[in-house]
């Protein structure tokens, strides 16, 4: 759902600072409102305190403290209708590759990825009505 400025608000969560900053820059250059967090608990706090509702979360899976699948479950429970896309360079890791380990309708984007692929996926998920339990 777009914000007052007409663009969606996206939360980028990644403990790798350089990747997070690159994603934030790229999304902002496309006109999105972007907030960021370096790990799961910070992301929950950002989502709770954001002035604009978070429309989409792009989160790494393998992070210290709280893995992305747990973050996705908690965000979906607290914010029905939020969309989540997980990212990982560890696609062979059982935590990442097991679809039973993540919420339904939460895809995994394999790192590294081209910026245009990420932007296309962002557009796709922002224009898809989420399943609300």
Image (tube, rainbow, N blue to C red):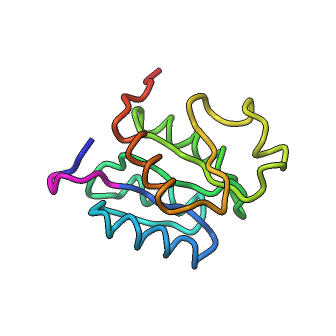
Horizontal placement of 41 versus 62: left or right?
left
Q: Is residue 39 part of the magenta span, yes or no?
A: no
> Which percent across, then down, holds residue 62?
72, 58
Highlighted range, magenta? 4-9
Horizontal placement of 18 versus 129: left or right?
right
Q: Is residue 8 part of the magenta span, yes or no?
A: yes
> Which percent across, then down, holds residue 20?
53, 70
Horizontal placement of 67 versus 83: left or right?
right
Q: Residue at x 63, y 69 (%)?
A: 15
Q: Main secondary structure of the magenta part?
A: loop
Q: Residue at x 51, y 43 (%)?
A: 84
- 79 vs 100, nearest the viewer: 100
Quarter of the rendering occupied by the N terminus? top left
> Which percent across, then down, holds residue 70?
65, 44
> Which percent across, then down, holds residue 69?
66, 44
- Using the image, determine if residue 57 lies above or below residue 13: above
- 122 vs 99, nearest the viewer: 122
Instruction: Give the image quarter of residue 104.
Output: top right
């Amino acid at each position: 759902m777009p914000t007052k400025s007409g663009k969606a608000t996206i939360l980028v969560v990644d403990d790798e600072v350089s990747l997070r900053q690159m994603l934030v820059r790229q999304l902002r250059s496309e006109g999105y409102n972007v907030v960021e967090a370096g790990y799961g608990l910070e992301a929950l706090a950002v989502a709770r305190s954001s002035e604009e509702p978070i429309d989409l979360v792009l989160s790494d899976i393998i992070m210290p403290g709280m893995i992305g699948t747990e973050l996705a479950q908690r965000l979906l429970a607290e914010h029905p209708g939020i969309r989540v896309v997980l990212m990982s360079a560890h696609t062979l890791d059982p935590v990442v590759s097991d679809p039973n380990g993540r919420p339904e309708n939460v895809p995994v984007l394999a790192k590294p990825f081209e910026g245009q692929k990420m932007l296309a996926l962002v557009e796709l998920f922002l224009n898809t009505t989420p399943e609300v339990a």
